[in-house]
Amino acid sequence: MDDLEDISMQDVTLHASADNEPPRKKVKTTTTPSSTPSSSPPTTSFLTGKEGVCRIEVARVEWMTTTPWQRTPQTKSSGTGFIIAATQLANENLILTNAHVVRSSVDIRVRKHGSTRRFAAQVIVYAPDVDLALLTLKGCSLEDQKEFFGDVVEESSSTNKLSKHALELADELPSLQESVHVMGFPTGGTTICITEGVVSRIDLVMASAFNILLAIQIDAAINPGNSGGPAFDKHGKVVGVAFFKNTSKKTDNVGYLIPADVVRTFLGRCKLDRDAGTSTYTLSPSLPYDWHPLENASLRLAHKVPSSVHGILVTSLLIHWMEYLKKVTS
């Protein structure tokens, strides 16, 4: 664009081609700015977050369900995690990843982007209901902590010492068609990989065998090894954590993120457990009743539901919840 502007503003000399034509003169031309505004360059603030992303290498041994006195041979797998300032839990920096990444692990090693050194890590919170886990470095000195987490930034309002590489969670759910960038260490290499996509849908999905989870569907490529990696919005904040993709042959580019709100709720439950002095994790509460959607016309007719009424039909209520409701309503 600079070259075009320089050319448009230069002096242009006009020469006479015949002897009887008037002498040459100089004419200065200018260009009129285009009425169509130029598109602003895409934001790259999410690139600053790559310093907080790490590769997680796991050695696992699982129990055999048919012969529980035996174990499977040791296998290796890898995933992604990122540094999060879990000030709600303690005055420390932790690593957030998916629970299935570190499931049945016997050894965990983490490696920062741009580094060749691997650090031993251990699981301190395992939450299969929301497929999240928190890791901390294992048996590392203060020098090792500083090397992995980087310099700390002390908050003036407290004694918290936060890593400058700690990633910040988004405050709200992204909008449909909003652009997102997923970072991780997927299959095909050992260096960080960045893919781009848009938010296609926000819906409930089956996160585990016993829990349905709010999830963000995106069309960015998510492959084995991306699990636990952050997805950034245009402001460089984490809108979700990659945790699985639809592998059906009838679908294409269907990946899912655990929203930042779910991560924030997970950290809040961890804080409640720690404040209570327990070292265990409290699973997400399940609905205390059975229900059925009011979409079937015959069902609505059988229960005499007016056409103006919409929602769900509660078919049964757990006994202990009935006793609880009696107490709070009496």
Image (spheres, helix red, strand yellow):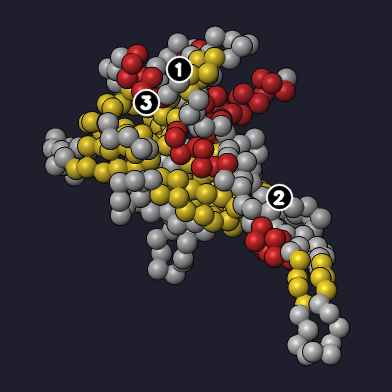
Characterize the local packing of mark 2: few (<14), some (14-19) or many (20 or more) Cα atoms within 10 angstroms.
Answer: few
> Residue drawn at (40%, 49%), measured in percent from left and top?
193
Q: Where is the N terminus found, in terms of image quarters?
A: bottom right
Residue on which the image places disc 2: 311
Give the number of the mark in front: 1 or 2: 1
Q: CA distance from mark 3 to mark 2?
A: 50 Å
Q: Which residue sits at x=76%, y=66%? A: 11
**Label 1, label 2: how far apart the Cα atoms are:** 44 Å
Q: Is residue 314 above or below residue 93?
A: below
The answer to the question of whether label 3 and label 1 lie on touching residues, with beta carbons closer than 8 A, is no
Q: Earlier in the sequence, mark 1 or mark 2?
A: 1
Q: Residue at x 50, y 37 (%)?
A: 49
Q: Answer with left or right where residue 124 lies relative to residue 69.
A: right
- Find the residue positioned furthest to the front: 19
Look at mark 1 in the image and give the residue it sits on. Answer: 92
The amino acid at mark 2 is Gly
Q: Is residue 134 above or below residue 81?
A: above
Residue that mark 3 sits on: 148
Mark 2 residue element: loop
Where residue 23 sits in the image (x, y, percent)?
A: 84, 79
